Image (spheres, rainbow, N blue to C red):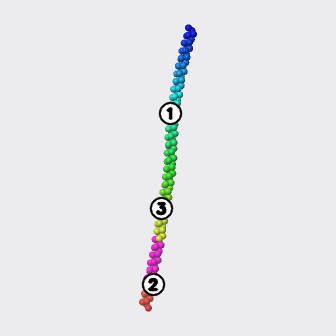
Amino acid sequence: MQETLNKKVQERINEEKIRIEESLRKKVNDETAELINSLKKDLEEKNKRLIDFQKMELELLKVRQEKEELKEKIALEKEKEFLERLKVEREKIRQAVDDEFLLKIKEKDKLIESMKSEIEEVKRKAEQGS
C-alpha cells in the first residue's frame, strides 16, 4: 500500500510538474509573443519615422534646388534688365551725339547761307557801284 501511495504521490508530483512546466511554457511563449509584437511595433514606428525623415530630406533638397534655380533666374533677369537699360542709354547717347552733329551741320549750313547772302549782297553792291 505504501508503494501504491508513493506511486500515486509520484504521479501527482509528475502531473503537477507537467502542469507547472506547461503553465511556465505558456507564460514564456505569451511573454515572448508580447515582446516580439512590441518590438515589431517599435520597428514599424521607426521605419515610419525613417520614411517621414527621408521624405522631409527629399523635400528639403527640392526646396534648395528650387532656391538655386530661382537665384539663377533672378540673376539672369537682372542681367537682361541691365543689358536692356544699357542698350537704351547707348541709344540715348547715340541720339544725343547725332542731334548735336546735325545741329552743328545746320549751324554751318546757316553760316554758309549767310555768307552766300553777304557775298551776293557785296556782288550786287559792287555791280551797282561800277
Q: Nearer the viewer, mark 3 or mark 1?
A: 1
Q: Which residues are magenta?
A: 99-122
Which secondary structure lies at badge 3?
A: helix
Q: Which residue is mark 3?
A: 84
Cα distance, mark 2 to mark 3? 51 Å
| Image mark for residue 66 | none
Q: Earlier in the sequence, mark 2 or mark 3?
A: 3
- Disc 1: CA contacts within 10 A as few (<14), some (14-19) or many (>=20): few
Which secondary structure lies at badge 1?
A: helix
- Disc 2: CA contacts within 10 A as few (<14), some (14-19) or many (>=20): few
Q: Quadrant of the N terminus?
A: top right
Q: Which is nearer the eye, 15 or 69?
A: 15
Q: Amino acid at mark 3?
A: Glu
Residue under the point 54% across and 15% down: 12
Q: Quadrant of the C terminus?
A: bottom left
Residue under the point 54% across and 21% down: 21
Q: Amino acid at mark 1?
A: Lys
Q: Amino acid at mark 2?
A: Ile
Estimate the x, y position of residue 49 in percent, counting from the top left. 50, 38
| Image mark for residue 119 | 2
Residue 115 part of the magenta-drawn span: yes
Residue under the point 51% across and 31% down: 37
